[in-house]
Image: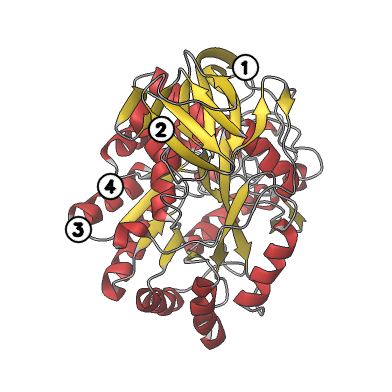
Amino acid sequence: MTTLISGGQVVSPSGALPADVLVDGETIAAVGAPGTLTGDETIDATGKYVLPGGIDAHTHMEMPFGGTHSVDTFSTGTTAAAWGGTTTIIDFAVQAKGTSLLSTLDKWHAKADGNCAIDYGFHMIVSDVNDQSLKEMEACVDGGVGSFKMFMAYPGVFYSTDGEILLAMQKAREIGATIMMHAENGIAIDQLAAQAVAAGNTDPVQHGLTRPPELEGEATSRAIQLAKVTGAPLYIVHLSASQALAAVAEARNDGQNVFAETCPQYLYLSIEDLAKPDFEGAKYVASPPLREKSHQADLWRGLRTNDLSVVSTDHCPFCFKDQKELGRGDFRAIPNGIPGVEHRMDLLHQGVVAGELTLGRWVETCSATPARMFGLYPRKGVIAAGSDADIVIYDPSASQTLSAETHHMNVDYSAYEGFELTGRVHTVLSRGRVVVSPSGFSGSTSHGKFLSRSLNQYLN
């Protein structure tokens, strides 16, 4: 059976054009002028956008953290992603100290295999740099995992020294891999946090006050210099602060292979949310923390200028009850993470509505660029003949109100409760299969396939 998507505006990074799309099996067979294609079945997209499926390149399903774990399984998290127009996630396999990278990757394959509603890939978190780990990085690349995340934060858990980062970057340069960096000065932050608690300042807002933007800017600059010395490509994850953005922009202007992502929470939420009374601020604890609103204009501008290349979610959901509440009396014990995999496409479309982004830039930051950045293009990230039929039909005139009462993520609150948005997903196809439509979810959590990725395509 072939399916014709007719009457819509196909959106690419260069803008929107009226076109029909023919799907044959799991792939796109043709894209043609309106009325030039025929199919066995037809989906009417009149008045709607036809987009390549969203790619969320930063999620944490079933992630262990602080004695608990994120509450979305691969099944629930990928189903929620599909509801929001995301048809691919790239999750993080988390190496524990004293374990190998390859055994960790096997563990994450076992978690995800047969349990995903959409396609998925992995990045590797390297928390234990040693001779074995460095050797195994090459085997990970051979296994379709060509990106390695490191931390300048969380001493004693994920933290790597500058020397360890240098070694991993040298290896990445050798094998063509990309180093992803959580750039905050964790050593200084831990001192500030300890001082706050000693002074009796334990509320959630202290999480933000003890992780000042200057320490994100400093760590970002340091990571950039280490990457310059080693020649490794560098991707800064979840950038939140103007100081960090300035460092990235300077490096890019100098021609260095430095890239960065931001997340919807840094575009829409602020430290005022962290300061909500009655421990409500705990819902908004993530790292880096939410910033003063003054940073938001810089981040939107960074998206327009491509100093910020990608919008991901850092989806890491912990329930308010029993999980976030672990930090009552000590903000340091609040599990770090904000749920968002379901709402990224909608929140960024709101940026289009507000004039912050063009339609083309929306699709570029949410789909096309992450596909290229992480070795999936043109299989993913584009509406073109031969590409996977990961297609979102999006109604730009529909309205919706975000709420925990209606979202599909496995978490008991919404960070965007009450947000009124213009635009919403109408129909989603994953590899040619309709998984979301006005009648509901019709996918299967065994549908998603592992994606063996090539290397960063911006370096070719």
Where on the picture, by quarter, is residue 124?
Answer: bottom right
Q: Earlier in the sequence, mark 3 or mark 1?
A: 3
Kindly identify which residue carries mark 4.
246
Find the distance from the CA under tag 1 to the CA under tag 2. 33 Å
Q: Is residue 374 left or right of residue 26?
A: left
Say which residue appears at 49% left-offset and 25% top-offset: 38
Per the model, the C-alpha gap separating discs 3 and 1 is 42 Å
Upstream in sequence: badge 4 or badge 1: 4
Residue in the picture at 31% in, 39% down: 302
**Residue at (54%, 80%) from the top-left corner?**
136
- Badge number at residue 255: 3
Q: Nearer the viewer, mark 1 or mark 2?
A: 2
Disc 1 marks which amino acid? Thr
**Amino acid found under the numbered disc labelled 4:** Ala
- Residue under circle 1? 401
x 49%, y 72%: residue: 141
Q: Quick one: quadrant of the N terminus?
A: top right
Work out whether 453 lies above or below 338. below
Circle 3 SS class: loop
Mark 2 or 3 closer to N-term? 2
- Between tags 2 and 4, which lies in front? 2
SS at badge 4: helix
The kind of secondary structure element at disc 2 is: strand
The amino acid type found where label 3 is placed reads Gly
Tag 2 residue = 31
